[in-house]
Image (tube, rainbow, N blue to C red):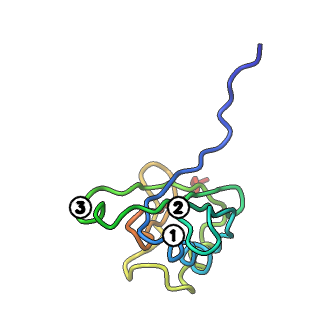
Protein backbone atom coordinates (compact mmCIF):
# COMPACT_ATOMS: atom_id res chain seq x y z
CA UNK A 1 0.00 0.00 0.00
CA UNK A 2 1.28 3.48 -0.87
CA UNK A 3 2.05 6.31 1.48
CA UNK A 4 -0.06 9.49 1.65
CA UNK A 5 1.63 12.46 0.02
CA UNK A 6 0.78 16.13 0.53
CA UNK A 7 0.95 17.74 -2.89
CA UNK A 8 -0.32 21.34 -2.79
CA UNK A 9 -2.11 23.82 -0.60
CA UNK A 10 -4.72 26.30 -1.80
CA UNK A 11 -5.27 28.85 0.97
CA UNK A 12 -8.64 30.61 1.07
CA UNK A 13 -8.44 34.34 1.82
CA UNK A 14 -11.43 36.32 3.07
CA UNK A 15 -12.37 39.33 0.92
CA UNK A 16 -15.23 41.83 0.91
CA UNK A 17 -15.50 42.01 -2.87
CA UNK A 18 -14.26 39.13 -5.01
CA UNK A 19 -14.25 41.19 -8.23
CA UNK A 20 -12.04 43.88 -6.64
CA UNK A 21 -9.77 41.21 -5.15
CA UNK A 22 -9.47 39.49 -8.54
CA UNK A 23 -8.53 42.80 -10.14
CA UNK A 24 -5.80 43.38 -7.53
CA UNK A 25 -4.32 39.90 -7.85
CA UNK A 26 -4.47 39.94 -11.66
CA UNK A 27 -3.51 43.55 -12.45
CA UNK A 28 -1.12 44.25 -9.59
CA UNK A 29 0.36 40.86 -8.67
CA UNK A 30 0.45 39.14 -12.07
CA UNK A 31 -1.90 36.25 -11.30
CA UNK A 32 -4.41 34.82 -13.77
CA UNK A 33 -7.96 33.85 -12.92
CA UNK A 34 -8.12 30.07 -12.50
CA UNK A 35 -11.87 29.85 -11.88
CA UNK A 36 -14.86 31.74 -10.50
CA UNK A 37 -18.21 30.42 -9.34
CA UNK A 38 -20.00 33.17 -11.31
CA UNK A 39 -18.71 35.19 -14.25
CA UNK A 40 -20.38 38.48 -13.23
CA UNK A 41 -20.67 38.46 -9.44
CA UNK A 42 -18.48 35.72 -8.00
CA UNK A 43 -18.42 34.93 -4.31
CA UNK A 44 -15.62 32.39 -4.66
CA UNK A 45 -12.74 32.41 -7.13
CA UNK A 46 -9.18 31.24 -7.55
CA UNK A 47 -6.10 32.91 -8.96
CA UNK A 48 -2.93 31.19 -10.14
CA UNK A 49 0.61 32.29 -10.81
CA UNK A 50 3.27 29.76 -11.69
CA UNK A 51 2.85 26.87 -9.24
CA UNK A 52 0.65 28.51 -6.62
CA UNK A 53 -3.08 28.99 -6.41
CA UNK A 54 -4.91 31.24 -3.95
CA UNK A 55 -8.67 31.14 -3.43
CA UNK A 56 -10.67 34.27 -2.64
CA UNK A 57 -13.95 33.97 -0.74
CA UNK A 58 -16.54 36.68 -0.15
CA UNK A 59 -17.37 37.49 3.46
CA UNK A 60 -20.23 39.71 4.60
CA UNK A 61 -19.38 43.29 5.62
CA UNK A 62 -20.53 42.55 9.19
CA UNK A 63 -17.59 40.19 9.55
CA UNK A 64 -15.21 43.12 8.93
CA UNK A 65 -16.61 45.36 11.68
CA UNK A 66 -14.53 43.63 14.36
CA UNK A 67 -10.78 43.79 14.16
CA UNK A 68 -9.63 40.23 13.61
CA UNK A 69 -6.37 38.78 12.45
CA UNK A 70 -6.18 37.97 8.78
CA UNK A 71 -4.11 35.16 7.27
CA UNK A 72 -0.42 35.64 6.49
CA UNK A 73 0.84 33.55 3.57
CA UNK A 74 4.52 32.79 3.07
CA UNK A 75 5.21 32.15 -0.60
CA UNK A 76 8.52 30.62 -1.70
CA UNK A 77 9.91 32.30 -4.79
CA UNK A 78 12.98 32.51 -6.98
CA UNK A 79 14.62 35.72 -8.17
CA UNK A 80 13.07 37.74 -5.38
CA UNK A 81 14.70 40.96 -6.55
CA UNK A 82 12.92 40.72 -9.91
CA UNK A 83 9.57 40.13 -8.20
CA UNK A 84 10.18 43.06 -5.87
CA UNK A 85 10.95 45.31 -8.86
CA UNK A 86 7.81 44.08 -10.67
CA UNK A 87 5.58 44.88 -7.69
CA UNK A 88 7.33 48.20 -7.06
CA UNK A 89 6.49 49.29 -10.61
CA UNK A 90 2.82 48.44 -9.98
CA UNK A 91 2.60 50.54 -6.80
CA UNK A 92 1.68 47.60 -4.56
CA UNK A 93 3.76 48.46 -1.50
CA UNK A 94 3.61 50.69 1.52
CA UNK A 95 6.43 53.25 1.37
CA UNK A 96 8.53 51.31 3.91
CA UNK A 97 8.35 47.92 2.15
CA UNK A 98 11.81 46.57 1.45
CA UNK A 99 13.64 43.33 0.82
CA UNK A 100 15.40 42.21 3.97
CA UNK A 101 17.59 39.36 5.07
CA UNK A 102 16.36 37.55 8.16
CA UNK A 103 18.01 35.72 11.04
CA UNK A 104 16.36 32.51 9.75
CA UNK A 105 18.39 32.73 6.52
CA UNK A 106 15.82 34.08 4.09
CA UNK A 107 15.57 37.13 1.88
CA UNK A 108 11.98 38.42 1.89
CA UNK A 109 9.47 41.22 1.58
CA UNK A 110 5.90 41.45 2.84
CA UNK A 111 2.77 43.53 2.32
CA UNK A 112 -1.01 43.34 2.65
CA UNK A 113 -3.59 42.87 -0.08
CA UNK A 114 -6.73 45.04 -0.32
CA UNK A 115 -8.34 43.22 2.61
CA UNK A 116 -5.36 43.04 4.98
CA UNK A 117 -4.39 39.48 4.12
CA UNK A 118 -0.64 39.30 4.54
CA UNK A 119 1.62 38.15 1.71
CA UNK A 120 5.28 37.40 2.35
CA UNK A 121 7.46 36.40 -0.61
CA UNK A 122 10.79 34.84 0.26
CA UNK A 123 13.72 32.78 -0.87
CA UNK A 124 16.37 30.92 1.05
CA UNK A 125 19.76 32.61 1.37
CA UNK A 126 22.55 30.65 -0.23
Percent position (x, y) of residue 114? Answer: 43, 73
Percent position (x, y) of residue 117? Answer: 41, 63
Which residue is denoted by mark 2 in the rendering? 56
| Quadrant for the N terminus in the image | top right
Q: Please say if 74 is above or below 33.
A: above
As rendered, which of 68 and 79 lies closer to the eye? 68
Report, in whole angstroms, how far the alpha carbon at label 1 lies from the one at label 2.
Answer: 6 Å
Which residue is denoted by mark 3 in the rendering? 67
Q: Are marks 2 and 3 in contact (CB under 8 Å)?
A: no
Q: Earlier in the sequence, mark 2 or mark 3?
A: 2
Q: Earlier in the sequence, mark 1 or mark 2?
A: 1
Which residue is at 50% across, 62% downward? 108
Q: Are marks 1 and 3 in contact (CB under 8 Å)?
A: no
Q: Quadrant of residue 75?
A: bottom right
Report, in whole angstroms, how far the alpha carbon at label 2 lies from the one at label 3.
Answer: 19 Å
Which residue is denoted by mark 1 in the rendering? 18
Q: Quadrant of residue 59?
A: bottom left
Q: Earlier in the sequence, mark 1 or mark 3?
A: 1
Which residue is at 57% across, 78% downward? 23
Percent position (x, y) of residue 3? Answer: 71, 20
Which residue is at 60% across, 45% downward? 9
Q: Quadrant of residue 14?
A: bottom left
Amino acid sequence: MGKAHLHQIHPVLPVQNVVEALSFYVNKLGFKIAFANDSKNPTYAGVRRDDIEIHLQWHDAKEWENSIDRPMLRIVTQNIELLFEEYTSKDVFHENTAIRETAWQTKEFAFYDLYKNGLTFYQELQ
